[in-house]
Image (cartoon, rainbow, N blue to C red):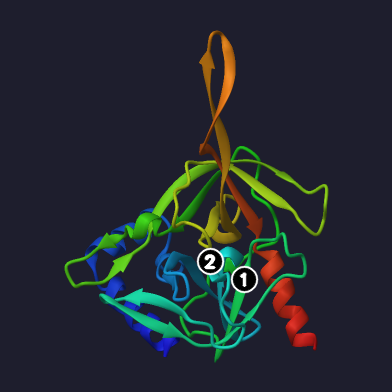
Amino acid sequence: MLRQYMMLVLAVLTASALTCHAQSNGVPLNILGRVLYLRNGDTTGTGTGFLIDYKDKEYLLTARHVVAGLALHNPNLQFYRSADWREISGDIIFPANKNVDIAVIDLHQRASLETSPELTSESPTIGGQVYFIGFPYGLHTLYSNGEYLPLVKAGVFSGLDDSDPVEIIYYVDGFNNPGFSGGPMVYIDNKTHTWRIVGVVQGYRAENVKTKVKGKDIDTGLLVNSGILIAYPVDYALKAIDGMIAK
């Protein structure tokens, strides 16, 4: 049901002159049309997820904290389309390392027929431009036909921490907002001119606000967005799927 509905949405959006213009000049529809606005029905918390095709099956990726507290089988997780919340059925699996903020929902259905975005385990070039996609505060691009697409923001791939191979972290100079969690981080390979999904957004690094009192720095206890986005390689999701298939 989810796959059929998403294919219908993609068909409607592709027919729009506005989206055709966006497809030719920005992030392509085969990525944008697969990004979903999610709600954790047990907490009413919201976030972002995206569909991928891998080894002839379809999966939904999001952040681990977006599905916190949900049952592993048929979790109370919904996606939003056409002014309505719709149930997602499947099974949740996680990467082996609990610190990796990624969750995978096995939708138990075959891969979609439309062109699937490319997944990569190769990190972007340091200093290169990347994009992160999602529904900050539930905001989205709304079309006159009632359908919509997620918002896109850009940043600079600042670096990574691969000192621990089971918990590689990507850092991006980009002002992330609540609601992007679980969305895809993408970039375009300048050699092949191919758009690639490289990571899953976790959130942003928080910074403790300080103030001066009589010339001394005093912690206020308030945390603000430092402007550094944190993401995890999409490869962790693929390894989790491989581990499930091997069992």
Where residue 103 is drawn, which disc sits there?
1
Q: Nearer the viewer, residue 176 or 31?
A: 176
Q: Quadrant of the C terminus?
A: bottom right
The amino acid marked with disc number 2 is Val
Q: Is residue 233 above or below residue 148?
A: above
Where residue 66 is drawn, which disc sits there?
2
Query: Is 125 situated left or right of 181 in this image?
Result: right
Q: Is residue 102 above or below residue 53?
A: above
Name the secondary structure under disc 1.
strand
Where residue 45 is drawn, which disc sits there?
none
Give the crowd class for mark 2: few <14, some 14-19, many >=20 residues within 10 Å: many
Q: Which residue is pictured at 32% across the width and 76% down the height?
A: 81
Give percent across and percent down for residue 158.
63, 39
Q: Which residue is pictured at 48% across the width and 46% down the height?
A: 176
Q: Distance of mark 1 from mark 2, alpha carbons?
A: 8 Å
Give percent across and percent down for residue 29.
40, 67
